């Protein structure tokens, strides 16, 4: 998720290695409303909007930088780097409790095997785990 201060105007010349990750964000040019909850949004409407925002984040080349930025500055609102407000609060709470679990995506990117898929039963009828070459 891009910064709301000046989301689409990169500072100076932006190159792939310049460190200006926001210029390469998948959400650049999108309607940013999908990333932020309207007043009084609850339940299924919120879940649908957050799922839509996460779909934009999934293939983003700067997902990790975006997420790290939001966690570092304590961004209280919106979906950033595929993490919702609730995801970030839970992550911060776990860190303060001393839990040092690696921060992996709760929403795996396409083409990657999640830890759940890796142990999924094979469709060959044996019920054993799927072996991937």
Image (spheres, rainbow, N blue to C red):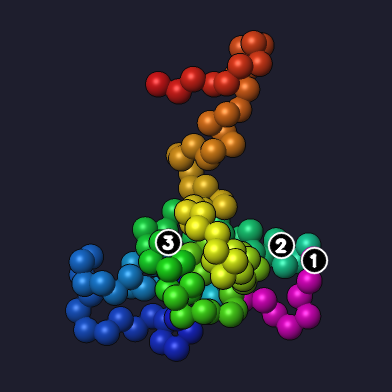
Which residue is at 49% across, 37% downward? 113
Q: Is residue 79 among the parts visible in the rendering? A: no
Q: SS at mark 3?
A: helix
**The C terminus lies in which quarter of the figure?**
top left
Where is residue 116? Give x, y as percent. 59, 36
Q: Look at mark 3 in the image and give the residue it sits on.
A: 63
Crowdedness near tag 3: few (<14), some (14–19) or many (≥20) residues, C-alpha within 10 Å: many
Q: Magenta stretch: residue 45 in it?
A: no
What is the distance, in whole Å, between disc 3 and disc 2 at their CAs?
A: 20 Å
Q: Are marks 2 and 1 in contact (CB under 8 Å)?
A: yes
* Image: magenta residue range: 36-43
Q: SS at mark 2?
A: helix
Q: SS at mark 1?
A: helix
Return the residue nearer the eye: 40 or 32: 40
What is the distance, in whole Å, between disc 2 and disc 1 at their CAs?
A: 6 Å
Where is residue 21? Give x, y as percent. 33, 70
Q: Look at mark 1 in the image and give the residue it sits on.
A: 43
Up-down: is 24 above or below 76? above
Q: Tell me the tag on residue 128.
A: none
Up-down: is 114 above or below 65? above
Q: Are marks 3 and 2 in contact (CB under 8 Å)?
A: no
Q: Does 122 sit left or right of 30 as displayed?
A: right
Which residue is at 72% across, 67% downward? 46
What is the distance, in whole Å, between disc 3 and disc 1 at their CAs?
A: 25 Å
Q: Look at mark 2 in the image and give the residue it sits on.
A: 47
Which residue is at 50% across, 58% downward? 100
Where is residue 96? Give x, y as percent. 56, 70
């Amino acid at each position: 998720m891009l910064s709301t201060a000046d989301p689409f105007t990169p500072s100076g010349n932006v190159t792939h290695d310049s460190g200006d990750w926001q210029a390469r964000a998948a959400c650049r040019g999108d309607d940013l409303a999908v990333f932020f909850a309207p007043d009084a949004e609850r339940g299924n409407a919120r879940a649908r909007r957050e799922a839509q925002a996460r779909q934009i984040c999934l293939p983003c080349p700067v997902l990790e930088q975006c997420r790290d930025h939001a966690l570092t500055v304590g961004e209280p609102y919106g979906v950033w780097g595929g993490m919702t407000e609730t995801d970030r609060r839970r992550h911060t709470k776990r860190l303060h409790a001393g839990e040092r679990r690696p921060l992996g995506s709760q929403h795996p990117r396409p083409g990657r095997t999640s830890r759940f898929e890796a142990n999924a039963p094979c469709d060959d009828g044996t019920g054993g785990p799927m072996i991937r070459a």
